[in-house]
Every structure is written in structure tokens, then in C-alpha cells.
Amino acid sequence: MDRNKISIPLKIIAFLIHSRIFIGCIAFMLCLQTQIQLGIPIQFRPYLGVVFFGALLAYHLNHLKWIIQEKYLLNEHKYLWLREHLSLFYVICALSFIGFLISFLFVGFLLQIILLPFLLITLFYSLPVFSGRYILFNLREIPGIKIFLISFVWTAITVILPVLASDVEFKWHHVIWMCMERFIFAFAITLPFDIRDMEVDFQSGLKTIPHWLNKKNTIHLSNLLLLSFFLICSVHYFFMQMYFLIPAYFLSAASAFVFMNVEKIKRLPFYYEGILDGSLLFQTLYVCIFAFLSSINL
């Protein structure tokens, strides 16, 4: 594609994805989705700033690490945008840190304590722990743990945090079901990323699920997880009498299934960071639409 002929909308999409603003918005919207699932009015609390800016900062930390230590990687084609916008990258990192710090100071002492373990997990996932000149460990390099950590952190930050930040009491079995749903869906759509990174992970000695199952079986696993996700949601929201959520989650699972199995879609620009990650945003949109339709009794 001639870079000079790229349309303005595609340039905007590229900026949102490469700057990680898109992923920050997804995390923000998932927290609002959780509020809808909990049956409470939408609340804009300081923790939403922690989630948005924290997502931006977390996804930039790894790039920042190798820009400092292994700047030669910027010569690779997949980092073209970053190489051409390095100053902007530093600005976004700084603004993300400032926004995160300000939001963190306003969430209250209890939430700050609760957030600390997740902050440490995120930090140790992105950056290695050193002892002198030697690396002690890096969470992402532990075989098989990467995808579990990603799914766990997304679940904790976008489900548990909104629950704890709310002044309303909830039935904890309801929250546990929600955690299961968010974890399974995040796990399912993250597996294709491990397929994409198989060669790089293999060269670095990191074993992931696709190395054990192969590509085809990993996609089968993703499809099975999506089916499990929808079945769990159906049972959960049927007994909670939140029937409007069932079609929303059917569309969410069906959309993700199409994204992961249609070859033409896989060849589209920004397939991973835009379309697959975007399936989380689609889920929130479906929930919002059906919640609105339910509220006006259509």
C-alpha cells in the first residue's frame, strides 16, 4: 500500500492503535460494561482514569525497555510507526504516567492497596527484575504463563476493580460468574496473538500454548472457549433475570468467532491490535445497545 495514499480515517485508526489509546479506551469501556452488568447507573469514578492511563502505560513499558536497551529493533518494519513518531511516543509515555499518578492519588487508600499487586504484576511482566548485572526473572518469559497473566489482569482491572469501587453491595456469586466470563473471553481472543508470535517466542526459548497444541488446535481451543463463554453467560444471566444480556453475549461470541476463523479478515490491516482487541469493544457496544433497548421496553 502506498503510504502517501492512505486515507485520513485509516491514519486516525493507525494513530489510535499504535499510540495504545485504543487499548486504553477498551479497558475504560469494559469497566462501564461491568457497571451495566452489575445493574448500577454508569458512574465516572477516579479509578477509570487509573484503568485508562494504566493500560496506556503498561503497553508502552515494554517498548520503552527495548528502545533504551535494544534500539536496533526500531529498524524492523513492524515498528515503522514508532520509529517515525519516537518523540510522540515519549510524550504519550509521560502523559500516561502523569495521568495515571493523578488518578491513582484520587482513588482512595483502600483501592490503592488493592491495586498494588496488579501494578507489580504488570511491571514485572513488562520489565525484567535485575540483581546487579544479571536478570533474575521476567514474568512473560515463564513458559505458559503469559496468556494467563494477561487474562487475569484484564479480569481483575475491569471486573473486580469496578465492583470494589462501587458503593453498592453485590452477590459475590454474580461477580465470580462475571470474572469467569471476562477471563475466558480474554483468553480466547489472546490465543491468536500467541500464534502470531510463535516464531519470536521460539527463538527466545519461550513455550506457549500454540507450541504445544499447534496452530490449528489452538484455534479450535479458542472456538471452544468462545462457545463455553456464551453458554456460561446464557445460564448466568438467565438465572439473574438479565435476559437482555444473552443476545449481547451471543453477538460478542459470534463476532469473535468470525474474526478468528475467516481468512479474509485475518489479512485486513490492524487485524490483531485493531480487530481482535476490538472484539472486546464490540462486546461493550452490544451490552450497551441491548441494555438501552431493555430500558425502553422494546
Image (cartoon, rainbow, N blue to C red):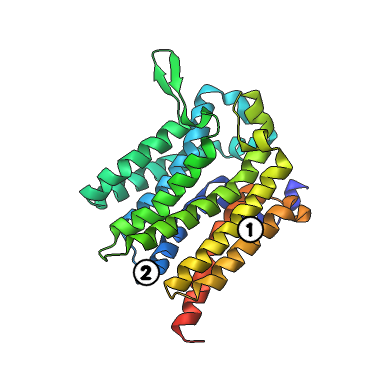
Look at the image and tell me whether residue 245 can be seen: yes
The residue lying toward the viewer, choosing from 141 and 8, is 141
- The residue that disc 1 covers is 256
Residue 15 seen from this side? no
Q: Which three-letter amino acid code belongs to the residue tagged 2?
A: Ile
> Looking at the image, which residue is at 54% across and 54% down?
185
Residue 253: image location, x then y, percent: 60, 61
Circle 2 Cα neighbour tier, 10 Å, few/some/many (<14 / 14–19 / ≥20): few
**Circle number at residue 42:** 2
Q: Label 2's element?
A: loop
Q: Is residue 60 above or below residue 30?
A: above
Mark 1 or mark 2, earlier in chain: 2
Q: Position of residue 268 (x, y in %)?
A: 73, 52
Residue at 36% x, 60% y is 173
Residue at the spot 46% in from the left edge and 85% down from the top edge:
296
Nearest the viewer among 93 and 285 is 285
Real-space CA distance between mark 1 and mark 2, rounded to the nearest whole angstrom? 26 Å
